[in-house]
Image (cartoon, coloured by chain):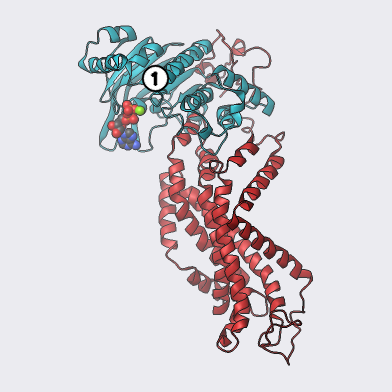
Chain colours: A cyan, B red
Amino acid sequence: MSVSIRDLGIVIGSQTLVSDVDLDIADGERVGLIGSSGSGKSMISKAMLGLTPDDAVLSGSVNLSGVEAVGADEVTLADLRGRYVGTILQDPFSSLNPVTTVGRQIELPLRLHYRLSKAERAGRVRRMLAKVGLDAGLADRHPNELSGGQAQRAAIATALITSPRLIVADEPTTALDSIAQRQIVDLLVRLVDDSGASMLFITHDFSVLARATTRAYVLEHGRVVESGATSDLLAKPSTPQAGRLVGAARKLALE
Amino acid sequence: MAQHDMLPAETVHDGRLGISDVVAGSCQADAVGPAGAEGSPQGRDSSPRPALHTPDEPVSLKGLGKLAVVLRSMWSQGEGRFALVVLACWIVVSLASIVWTPKKLWETDGYHVWAPPSADHLLGTDGTGADVFSWLMAGARTNLLIAILSVMLAGVVGVTLLMAMVSRSKMVSAISVVAVDALISIPTVLIALILAVPMGASIAVIILACGVGYGLNLARIARPQALLAAGSDYAVSARASGASGGYVLFRHVLPNSLPSIMVQLSLSAGTAILAESGLTYLGVGVPSGVPSWGHSLSTSVKLIDVYPLTVVWPGLTVTVVVVALNLFGDVLRQAIDPIVNTALRKVAA
Ligand SMILES: Nc1ncnc2c1ncn2[C@@H]1O[C@H](COP(=O)(O)OP(=O)(O)O)[C@@H](O)[C@H]1O
Ligand SMILES: [Mg+2]
């Protein structure tokens, strides 16, 4: 799925959180969105699926392979969500319902969008669990029995179960330790490439960005300040904002 | 809108299914994967969404297994055992009283009024010479009926208001919050007194007053927990999966608010028993002649100085049952929580 964001603006009350954002993702491309905490990354990802807070006022355009998401009605948006666009959130534990089994949560997009028999659904969940490197038995567990890495793998399975054409991953590794981070990024990249989907990968960490994306946008105070190939951004950031983020990533890598 | 949306294959496919193609209704046939991997067509405009429970799911069996686990873990605690025994006795006595009581309710013994306990009258007699034990037995079923119906009404009223209060619609939530806050300040007794004007003394007055009053309470007390669930990441995650607001409310917010709701409902059952006594004493509850614990209390309480024993029996019954109901709620909350009760998770498997 291709994404074309033009002049996106997000205002809540008197606060302008995002303005003049242009962002493109080609079919099958993995694109990064990097910026410090509070720069508006999550707002942009939410705006792509109409998940911004109710009091947010959106302007501009988010075009998902020909479908306009800004101002779209709830039916169109609900059809996009989980079926054509899979979402992975930052905190793997809080994004899983504590009182429902992992298997039931992974199959939710299938239940909502496709009419399948119970056996077909169970088979798909089983194969998906294997793909994300989880034991089939975990489907019957509750989230509090999982480790952070396992929970994030379950969240990835939920996002990918319907083979969506775009994955939006909002800081999917921030809550994990560095080894789990690398594993999760590599897994996500492999699965996304295998399925031919596009991905928007959001992070504040350049070291993760390099593994996950080929091209990236740097966001600062709700504006895109720099964009280009991820390797170029890492090697010679041309703006001080990108420079700061790269510096922080290098420092972390040395520690 | 598309009439033949296919579930994309699980493996690589080159003929990519663009969203524009699907939404425009021209689903590419080559986008569908190998046999077995595709979903059945679902014309979303012509056919309803899939049911939440497909018929092939053995819901009832799993439900029974869960019930057994919940009861077992309640039984494993002293308080739970006490509550279960008392409540079981209550139900058994209520049912038994329909067909049998030691003495007929209207059989009075004019020579033995206010009699102390004896072999003939297990708990003695009241001022008319009627058998206290028989009246308490028969009262059990009236109070059981009142407790069950009050709790059911409170549950319906409370959960409806709760869902409205935490719904994503600004207008619905604002109106319901104001309504609950305004109505909750009216005492249950006052609601009952007002209802009694057109309805007279009747069991329905107690049930309506308690059901509405405790429903309002339930909504307000469970609201913080429900708000937490409604604003949670898993609610956002479900919406990002395509779930509607209603689905999130009933599948995520409600189950996660169940502990507070359950405790509140069993407290309501106890409070309904107490309210029955109070309202019957005031003359707006159970009509005279209908057996109830409140009736037994109010007929004997006038002579408490002279014949205290007759008051003790209904008083003791009410106290024990109310304590049991309160303990029941506490123990139930832990037993139905899959996070606390590890045994419950095994059933879900
Ligand atoms: N519901 C909200 N109402 C008003 N402001 C918000 C809300 N949620 C987030 N913000 C603000 O929007 C800005 C961007 O937030 P966010 O997109 O979450 O940042 P990021 O994901 O880059 O860390 C922050 O300054 C934050 O304080
Ligand atoms: Mg964020």
**Residue type (three-letter) at the residue carrying disc 1:** Ser
On-image quarter of the C terminus of chain A: top left
Tell me residue B135's x, y (percent): 69, 77
Q: Which residue is mark 1?
A: A178
Q: Nearer the viewer, residue B270 or A46?
A: B270
Tell me residue A11's x, y (percent): 30, 32
Q: Nearer the viewer, residue A223 or A254?
A: A254
Tell me residue A142's x, y (percent): 55, 34
Q: From the viewer's perspective, is B263 left or right of B180?
A: right
Q: From the viewer's perspective, is A141 left or right of B130?
A: left
* Residue drawn where x is 67% and y is 76% of the image: B290
Judged from the image, the quadrant occupied by ligand 1 is top left
The 10 Å Cα crowd at callout 1, few under 14, some 14 to 19, many 20 or more, is few
**How many marks on residues?**
1
Q: From the viewer's perspective, is B296 left or right of B99?
A: left
Q: From the viewer's perspective, is A227 left or right of B295?
A: left
* Residue B283 makes an appearance in the image: no
